Image (tube, rainbow, N blue to C red):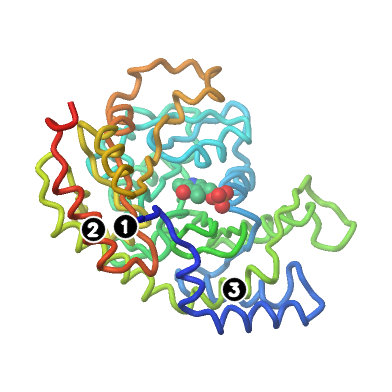
Amino acid sequence: MQIKCNVLDRQFQMYQPEYEQAALRVLRSGWYVLGNEVRQFEEEFAKYTGKKYCVGLNSGLDALIMSVRALGIGRGDEVIVQANTYIATVLGITENDAVPVFVEPDEYYNMDANKIEQAITDRTKAIMVTHLYGQASDMNSIVGIAQKHHLEIIEDCAQSHGACFDGRMTGTFGIAGCFSFYPTKNLGAFGDAGAIVTDDGAFADRLRMMRNYGSKIKYHNEIEGVNSRLDEIQAALLRVKLAHLQELNEERKTLANRYNEGITNPEVILPGLRQGAESIYHQYVVRCAGRDALQAALEQKGIQTQIHYPIPPHLAACYRHLGHKKGAYPITESYADEILSLPIYTGMTFAEQDYVIEQINAWAIEENK
Ligand SMILES: *Cc1c(COP(=O)(O)O)cnc(C)c1O
């Protein structure tokens, strides 16, 4: 059996008539960028998250960069970020010439709240928290620390659409909830797209201006903006998927529970769930001391896996100038050596998953030495 890490056509086929109708509606409308579909998606997504405003953008990276910029964070400022996040979170900071200050993750792969305060200096402006792999971070503690030190919270929700902490949705704990709708995400478009949700009207206004060359009125450029507009066709398709997001997330939870119960190989550490936190299992990430051998063995059996992420940002070549040495963030680095993301996607059959479980349970480190 051949099992891919991600299969995207099944989630299309699941609601194919609805997607085709939405796409045709836009094609026939004669209006393709920032129009009615975008407005309606923004309204629906704001309502879904429980925020007042949503600003549709080009990508998740833009959401991160523009949140930092719209808060006036720049050169000389520091932003706290978890060390094992995706590079985009860190780029959101460095694209504004601000300095990322890394904090190690906890056993749930999210920012270790106990290590935040020691990273705060008088230059710290914000905490950027990623709800990695779909699990909500420890937001009670993080909100408390942010309030105590007068710091903004920016949430990277690119992997956590609909995941809650203590019943409250990720993306609603700080000034900005940043979302990516890249096709592989739980709420994925059919191309690039992103958004920011917020309760702050002035902040939302500034973002709306910024995404369209810094102008509210055409050719009246009030700030130095960018082009980060959301396409009508993506907005229309996202509206279709948003209406089904609940059931799509439930499906992933079912698959994750089947992995939790099915994988019994003692060499493989299963993902935990923090008290109060929910996960929508954007990724199902296990850990294994013999990770490379396990990955190779699964590959041999036709099972594709991935590593999120093999090189932590502080060791990425692009950040050599920040001067971090190997060993600086040992937990992050050991995770990078041991984590493995198993196949999990919309439309994955139980038969496909049983095959993955069977092969993982059949694997033993000794045989591969
Ligand atoms: C996907 C992702 C992003 C970037 O989103 P794009 O839409 O690809 O720009 C940012 N942060 C995290 C954690 C992601 O997984």
Within 10 angstroms of label 1, few (less than 14), some, or many (20 or more) residues? few
- Which label was assigned to residue 355? 2
In front here: 243 or 51? Answer: 243
Residue at 37% x, 28% y is 119
In front here: 135 or 68? Answer: 135
Residue at 45% x, 23% y is 315
Q: Are marks 1 and 2 in contact (CB under 8 Å)?
A: yes
Within the image, what quadrant is residue 353 found in? bottom left
Q: Is residue 23 left or right of residue 127?
A: right
Residue 175 visible to an observer of this rendering: yes
Structural distance between the alpha carbons of marks 2 and 3: 33 Å
Q: Is mark 1 within 8 Å of ligand 1?
A: no
Q: Is residue 27 above or below residue 350?
A: below
Residue type beneath disc 2? Tyr
Residue type beneath disc 3? Leu
Percent position (x, y) of residue 9?
Answer: 50, 67
Percent position (x, y) of residue 306?
Answer: 38, 44
Structural distance between the alpha carbons of marks 1 and 2: 8 Å
Q: Is residue 105 above or below residue 259?
A: above
Give the residue at the far right of this rendering. 219
Q: Is residue 19 left or right of residue 104?
A: right
Closer to the chain start, of discs 2 and 3, is 3
Q: Is residue 180 left or right of residue 268?
A: right
Q: Quadrant of the C terminus?
A: top left
- Which label was assigned to residue 1? 1
Residue type beneath disc 1? Met
Closer to the chain start, of discs 1 and 3, is 1
